Amino acid sequence: MSEPSGTAGKLDLDPGLVRRARELAAVAGRPVVELARAHTTVSVERAVLRLAGVSGADPDGIPWVNRLVDAVAADVGLSHGVAVPVFDALAREMGSPAASAWPARDSLDALNLLAQKAAAGSVRFAVPQRPRAVRAAARKHVRAGLRRIDRRRAERERLVRRHGDPARRPWIYLIVATGDIYEDIPQAQAAARAGADAIAVIRSTGQSLLDYVPEGATREGFAGTYATQENFRLMRAALDETSAQVGRYVRLTNYASGLCMPEMAVLAGLERLDMMLNDSMYGILFRDINPVRTFVDQRFSRQVHARAGIIINTGEDNYLTTADAVDEAHTVTVSQLLNEFFAHEAGLADWQLGLGHAFEINPDVPESFRLELAHALLARELFPDAPLKWMPPTRHMTGDVFRGNLLDGFFNLAGALTGQGILLVGMMTEAVVTPWLSDRDIALQNVRYVLGAAGNLCEDFAPAPGGFIQRRAHQVLADAIALLERIDASPGGLLAAIADGTFGIMKRPADRGKGLDGVYPHAPDYYNPATELLETA
Amino acid sequence: MSVVRPYGDTTGDGMVQLSFTLPVPHDKRAEGAALQLAAKMGMDPAMLVHARQMGDGYTFFVVYGRVNHVVDLAKVNVVERDFPLLTAKDVNTVVKRRLRRKLSVVGACIGTDAHTVGIDAILNVKGIAGEKGLEYYRELKVTNLGAQVTVPELVEAARVEKADAVLVSQVVTQRDAHLTNTREMSAAFREAFPVGRRPLLVVGGPRFDETMAGELGVDRIFGRGTTPREVASYLVSALVPAGPRREG
């Protein structure tokens, strides 16, 4: 967001059409929000328990929150929420329904002990007729968790003031992915010293399909490192050290995607992560996660991110890895508009919306670079106050590392020309190996050269009125509006569009996919103290 | 002349380029070490054209030089295409005339591999490199199970779809996951189907060695750059009886 006003108006977009696109996205999104408001999931309920202070795992590595939620589900289901049955049982343990009578420390210990007893089958859960006192007790514990998140946010703001933000946009975003947190740390620190402003620790392949969050520091992962609370803590501490050395606050990124979005959001807030990948469409399309499950999870996780001051990164770039980046460019725009709607509804501010898009047009297509500029500028102008996450080429990286480095240079140039907020550094060895030390160094040289030589070129760059770039941007916006109109006109709405393969070609019906068995409709007495506190804040 | 050596700008000059990193800071000794490594790799003379320190203790080198090695093309073993390359129209015609039913193909990425780009390139109508995928072939019935399919799910789908061929794509190769997954898959099919009823097993991915089919228990391996048309042509040559029409 260097100077949003500096690029505004370059495409001469019709403000009426832009307004219309937003209205159509809201119409498409509203039923999904209603669906999310009427359901809960095992992961939402586990996140509530994490906020209330349940932590740790059994000897098999299954977290106590999973044990507790499973035990509650077995006794009374989850349609009432987990808070009331759990705090009702806890009140019996503590000998009083009034939380004011509980010593705070003891009640936290008792809560964790309750999880262990529940796992052993020695606690019976019930839904009390008069839940007022029990609700108050649950609210008190969850509020304490949210306050911890608030303190971490204040701490971030303090550290940013102390160390400073990067001197320029875009922020340079680099990935580490060794599988071993103790290898990741020196690599991340080296990357930060070499100029990275944000470090993302890629998760182990398949973690998004685990219906629990692993525990502890981990040294083994496949093509990535497990996201755990302890790994978050270790990496954040290491980057705090490096931030002080380099005199700039280095941000840490992980993933609130897959089956555990809500819990990841809570853990990220508790450990002061700064950015989180957060997009249910990725789970739906690429992991075949049930759409209802993940929309419910997404809403809760975004509410937590909003509270934690975390910037979300959305996954529109992913569509273009399977669908054609020219023919399907408008699906990216549609998804960005929907993501904006869902994010605002969940309480996120514009500065927290790292809406994704990517440089994925086949370089053999004539005028491919001008098309990329049109698409990137369209995103910039539609969302002038969002940071925007600009993703490098992957699909047309062939293993020819020389050509790949050139393509990455053009990608960097497009990012600079169109004022992108967060630039994920492309690797010339994409599709060959996980990046080597030298690959990262060459990639950073590439970025530094382009930003150094042309970082402010957006000041001089204005597409010709009525020219190729303007016409293309207008076309993509018109296509996006047409698609939104089709979605809104269809009886099944957005979920039907997803089922039909509108996004990224993959067809994902709402009654299929992983994690559906963890979705519960709200009973009239459903109670979730976290949602209550987050929505009234 | 079946003996060749690398070509820089003159026949027989043997010139190659090489880049690597050594875990040492950049100084004279580091450059000497880089040249010695190049010499041990058969580069003589070797020219150090670029050295750049990265971080505290690593240096990146680019070396150009002449190698003494030669390759005898007559002694190079590769899997040559041993089937005729057909057009989509020919594939459809052959299946229709000779098989007289649709040829059923089931595809998936197995294990934790979520990279569907390979199987999608071969199966999706979209295809790759301007060639349409197998879904586009009228006489092929394609079931694409997508990513992270378990082996039992794949076997079951092959049974339900009466698969003539099963296509498996593997991109992730950490810890040889692609080899382990492929062996597990072929063993499961061998167990689940009687001899002669087993679907044709085809795996593909950028890191497979095409000569390893026998070792992995599959019928064919396709490597980097394979197009849908090649796969379709192979399926027809392997599955559709060539000679006079037979009852299928």
Image (cartoon, grey):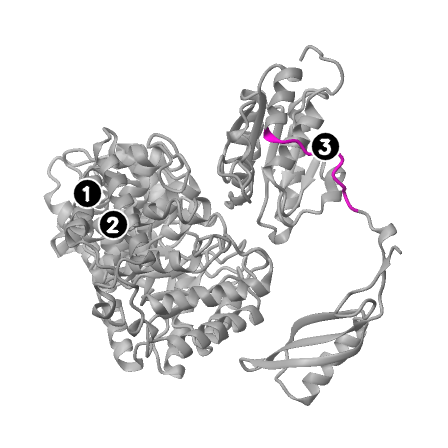
For the point 58% across and 23% down, the residue is: B104
Q: Tell whether B247 sits left or right of A112.
A: right
Query: Mark 2: which secondary structure?
Result: helix
Residue at far bottom of view:
B28
Front residue of A408 and A41: A408
Tag 2: amino acid: Leu
Q: Find the distance from the CA under tag 2 to the CA under tag 1.
A: 9 Å
Front residue of A387 and A521: A387
Magenta-span inclusion, residue B81:
yes
Q: Tell whether A139 sits left or right of B36.
A: left
Kindly identify which residue carries mark 1: A24
Q: Quadrant of residue B19?
A: bottom right
Q: Give me the chain letter of mark 1.
A: A
Tag 3: amino acid: Pro
At label 3, counting other C-alpha atoms closer than 10 Å, the crowd grade (few under 14, some 14-19, many 20 or more) is: few
Q: Find the distance from the CA under tag 3 to the CA under tag 2.
A: 49 Å
At label 1, counting other C-alpha atoms closer than 10 Å, the crowd grade (few under 14, some 14-19, many 20 or more) is: many
Marks 1, 3 in one chain: no
Residues rendered magenta in the picture: B78-88
For the point 24% across and 57% down, the residue is: A382
At label 2, counting other C-alpha atoms closer than 10 Å, the crowd grade (few under 14, some 14-19, many 20 or more) is: many
Front residue of B120 and B145: B120
Q: Give me the chain letter of mark 3.
A: B
Mark nearer the viewer, 1 or 3: 3
Split into 4 quadrants, where in the image is the N terminus of chain A? Answer: bottom left
